[in-house]
C-alpha cells in the first residue's frame, strides 16, 4: 500500500461517526448490517448515515449489496488488513531487542494499559 492511499483511508476514519460505523460493520462480520439497523444501532439519522457510508465506500473500507428492499453494508476486511499491514510492516525494525520474525510476526510487545471506555460519538450530553 502506498503512503498516499493509507493517509486517505486513515483520514476517512478520523471522523468519530465514520469510525463508529466502520467498527460496527467490523463487529457484524461477513453478514454485514442493513442501513436501517446500522442507523438505529448508532443512533444517527438516515441522511447522516448515508453521508458517512458514502465516504467509507469512497475509501474502499466498505461494500454494499442490495438484498430485496434492503441495502446490506459490510466492512472490507481486505482493505482493513492491508492498512494494518502497512502500518506495522516495519514495526520495531530499528530496535535490536525486537523479536519480530524470530518466533512469530508480532510487533513489539504491547505496553499494558488501563482500558477506558471511549465515549460514543453518537450520544449527546
Image (tube, rainbow, N blue to C red):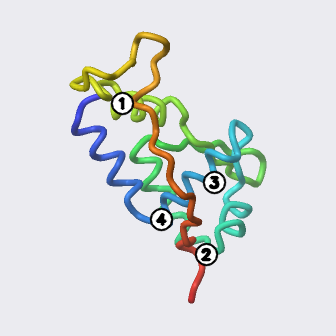
Query: Mark 3 or mark 1: which comes first in sequence?
Result: 3
- The residues bearing labels 3 and 1 have C-alpha atoms spaced at a distance of 23 Å
Q: Position of residue 85 (x, y in %)?
A: 40, 28
Taking depth in this image into account, of 43 and 105 the one nearest to the observer is: 105
Q: Which mark is residue 24?
A: 3
Q: Position of residue 97 (x, y in %)?
A: 31, 22
Q: Nearer the viewer, mark 2 or mark 3?
A: 3
Q: Residue at x 58, y 52 (%)?
A: 23
- The residues bearing labels 4 and 1 have C-alpha atoms spaced at a distance of 30 Å
- The residues bearing labels 4 and 2 have C-alpha atoms spaced at a distance of 10 Å
Taking depth in this image into account, of 80 and 48 the one nearest to the observer is: 80
Q: Nearer the viewer, mark 4 or mark 1?
A: 1
Q: Residue at x 23, y 35 (%)?
A: 3
Q: Which residue is mark 2?
A: 45
Q: Quadrant of the N terminus?
A: top left
Q: Which residue is mark 1?
A: 88
Query: Mark 4 or mark 3: which comes first in sequence?
Result: 3
- The residues bearing labels 2 and 3 have C-alpha atoms spaced at a distance of 16 Å
Q: Which residue is mark 4?
A: 51
- The residues bearing labels 2 and 1 have C-alpha atoms spaced at a distance of 36 Å
Residue 37 as seen in the image, left or right of residue 48:
right
Query: Mark 4 or mark 2: which comes first in sequence?
Result: 2
Q: Nearer the viewer, mark 4 or mark 3?
A: 3
Taking depth in this image into account, of 36 and 103 the one nearest to the observer is: 103
Amino acid at each position: 500500500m502506498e503512503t498516499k492511499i493509507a493517509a486517505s483511508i486513515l483520514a476517512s476514519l478520523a471522523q468519530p461517526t465514520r469510525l463508529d460505523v466502520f467498527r460496527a460493520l467490523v463487529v457484524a462480520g461477513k453478514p454485514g448490517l442493513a442501513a436501517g439497523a446500522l442507523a438505529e444501532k448508532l443512533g444517527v439519522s438516515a441522511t447522516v448515515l448515508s453521508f458517512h457510508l458514502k465516504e467509507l465506500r469512497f475509501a474502499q473500507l466498505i461494500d454494499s449489496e442490495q438484498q430485496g428492499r434492503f441495502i446490506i453494508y459490510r466492512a472490507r476486511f481486505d482493505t482493513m488488513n492491508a492498512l494494518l499491514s502497512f502500518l506495522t510492516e516495519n514495526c520495531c525494525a530499528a530496535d535490536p531487542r525486537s523479536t519480530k520474525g524470530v518466533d512469530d510476526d508480532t510487533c513489539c510487545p504491547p505496553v499494558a494499559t488501563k482500558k477506558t471506555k471511549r465515549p460514543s460519538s453518537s450520544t449527546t450530553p
